[in-house]
Image (tube, rainbow, N blue to C red):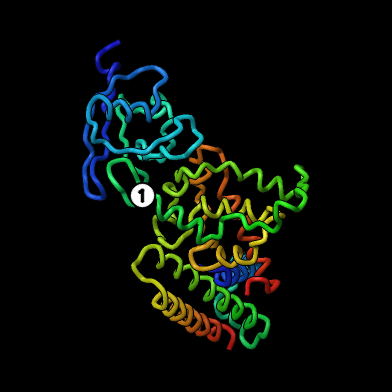
Amino acid sequence: MSQSQQHLTVSVWRGKSEGAFQDYQVPHLENQTVLDIVTWIQRYLDPTLSYRFACRVGMCGSCAMTVNGTPRWTCRTHVSKVARDGRLKIGPLSNLPVIKDLAADMTAFFEKWQRAEARFTPTKTRLDPIEQIPPSSPARLAASAAIECINCGVCYAACDTVRWNADYLGPAALNRAWTLVNDVRDGGQDVRLRAISANGGCHNCHSHQSCQVLCPQNLNPTASIAGLKRLTAAAFIRGGLK
Amino acid sequence: MDVRLYLAQRISAAVMLPLVILHILIILYAVSDGLNAVEILERTRGSLFWGVFYGLFVVSAAIHAAIGVRAIAREWTPATGRTLDYGAVLFGLLLLVLGARAVSAVVL
């Protein structure tokens, strides 16, 4: 193996919104993830490099970064699949402010979940019997198809509409709202439908589908948002959005 | 864009779809049949049907395009809030006036 094949040239964003990419030479190993690369740089080359991770196994959704121009979950992204000519370019997630280096500020992302009323509103107490939800019911199937979001922010960073319209709630918050409108136990439907029908709501989606192409969980937020559009339009016609 | 604008744009598109198809078929018919402008105007002048047909098209197009341009302006310019709304209304009115002139020239 030649020297160039043994090492990767990795350009890593250093700074905040103002900054620059800095090159590092990193040993190229088999079965190496992008998160491994970033960790190696921090441990052996530059301990001041800031990034975010937790589980390292694709569950927590905290390690998403921009890799060669595309948002990805770095702990499950193999270098061999994304490196081009022995080079990698790693930056923070797009559409979010940069705290430092590879750590994006997720505040706006999660605030939009709140704005979308994308949280469960219980209708029963622990004293009530557990609601029986048939797994094959249409609502449960729709919810199940969208439920495995890990809040990584990849869809939000990939979304053109988020980039163009700062008010837009984004694919993740709306996808979560879709799971809740299909939850028969939830008592917050009216408030939620109003929230996602307002300015910045689901009707701003252009269905570019970057979210469903890049979602590491293979979810389809575009389909969830289309469902919300149908639901809110029907609710408006029935006079249910007052 | 909120749900009201979304619905107005979808409904106006649904109205325009059959009108556009019929309009294109009429063009093909007129061209293949060798009708000249005078002969076409003879058929459209004083016609309530063509007045309603193209009047409906103009109204739908003005609504549809104004909402679409508002969305583009929201995403590609610094304009927000009332500026967007007034701009879209003005643009829609402009299309309405221009369209009404064209329809009146063909029908009246």
From where the camera sits, is residue B30 visible? no
Residue at (26, 50) in percent of width and height: A17
From where the camera sits, is residue A10 visible? yes
Nearest the eye: B45 or B94: B94
Number of marks present in the image shown: 1
Residue A100, image x and y in percent? 28, 44
Nearest the eye: A236 or A57: A57
Q: Determine the residue located farthest toward the front in the rendered image.
A: A127
Residue B28, image x and y in percent? 61, 64
Residue B98, image x and y in percent? 47, 81
Q: Is residue B100 above or below residue A180?
A: below
Q: Quadrant of residue A218?
A: top right
Residue at (29, 19) in percent of width and height: A27
Q: Is residue A40 above or below residue A113?
A: above
Residue at (50, 61) in percent of width and height: A115
Residue A107, image x and y in percent? 40, 53
Task: Identify the amino acid type marked 1.
Answer: Asp
Q: Quadrant of residue B7?
A: bottom right
Name the image quarter holding the C terminus of chain B.
bottom right
Label 1 sits on a secondary structure element that is loop
Nearest the eye: A152 or A66: A152
Q: Is residue A175 above or below residue B19?
A: above
Residue at (41, 47) in percent of width and height: A157
Q: Is residue A76 above or below residue B28?
A: above
Q: Which residue is mark 1?
A: A105
Structural crowding at the residue carrying mark 1, measured as other residues with C-alpha within 10 Å and reported as few (<14), some (14–19) or many (≥20): some
The subunit letter for the residue under badge 1 reads A
